Amino acid sequence: MATDSQQTSIRNEALGVACILAALISGTGAGLWVLAEPGLGDPSRFATVPTVQRWAYASLSLVKSIGFFAGLFGFARVATRFGAAIKTFLALAALGAAWFAGVWLYCAATGQITRVYVLGGLWYQWIAPIAVGIAAFGAGRVSRFQSAWTVAVGLINAVIFGPLGPAVAQIVQGVVWLPIGWFVLNPSLRRAPPSS
């Protein structure tokens, strides 16, 4: 039977792997797909994309929501004191991730992109990474670089889609989220928590 420490390690590994896979598949992979089929990222042409492709693309938003949230949750567990404030931000991020995925599934069903999905992304892709990264600075359980990277992920997600467009922005998004999964997956990157 696995010890508590082993079970925690297994959970962290699963969360880290989920984030890495989401970064590769629904970040970088989806971005490359939009480059190949521009109608997926164009609200005026989305309805012309074959239904199967719309549903598959929307399903990647579900993968992104689950994987990015898993990485963020895992990072919060290993890098912060996991107090009430972080739990609140993570609860809002979980709701945001569900909203984001749900709206994209609605878009696939209707053939119309509605920008209201941004309200979900706002929480789990922008605000929560910034909050978790700042809390990680205070906890001292990971390097300052990892804390700063997590803050940067939230800031980058907030600004990339307008200037870069959906294809390139998703590729960038995949690249910046990938290390968060690695931070969670690799225990050698963590420090012992400071003694109180």
Image (tube, grey):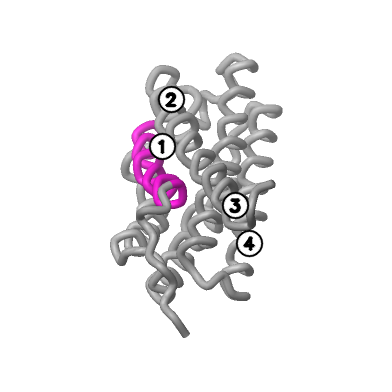
Q: Secondary structure at mark 1?
A: helix
Residue depicted at 47% across the width and 57% down the height: 126
Q: Pointer 1 and pointer 2: residues touching (CB < 8 Å)?
A: yes
Q: Is residue 36 visible?
A: yes
Residue marked by disc 3: 120
Whether residue 109 sits left or right of residue 44 in the image: it is right
Mark 1 residue type? Gln
Whole-Å distance between the Cαs marked 4 and 3? 9 Å
Whole-Å distance between the Cαs marked 1 and 2? 9 Å
Q: Quadrant of residue 153?
A: bottom left
Residue marked by disc 4: 92
Residue marked by disc 2: 34
Q: Residues within 10 Å of mark 2 (few under 14, many from 20)?
A: many
Q: Mark 4 or mark 1, which has the lower sequence index?
A: 4
- Of the two numbered discs 2 and 4 in the rendering, the one whose residue sits closer to the viewer: 4
Residue depicted at 64% across the width and 24% down the height: 55
Residue marked by disc 1: 170
Q: Mark 3 or mark 1, which has the lower sequence index?
A: 3
Whether residue 168 sits left or right of residue 34 in the image: it is left
Helix, strand or loop: magenta stretch? helix
Q: Secondary structure at mark 4?
A: helix
Q: Pointer 2 and pointer 3: residues touching (CB < 8 Å)?
A: no
Mark 3 residue type? Gly
Question: Does 70 lie within the magenta span?
Answer: no
Q: Pointer 4 and pointer 1: residues touching (CB < 8 Å)?
A: no
Residue depicted at 59% across the width and 54% down the height: 8
Q: Residues within 10 Å of mark 4 (few under 14, many from 20)?
A: some
Percent x, y for residue 45?
51, 24
Mark 4 residue type? Leu
Span colored in magenta: 167-185
Mark 2 residue type? Val
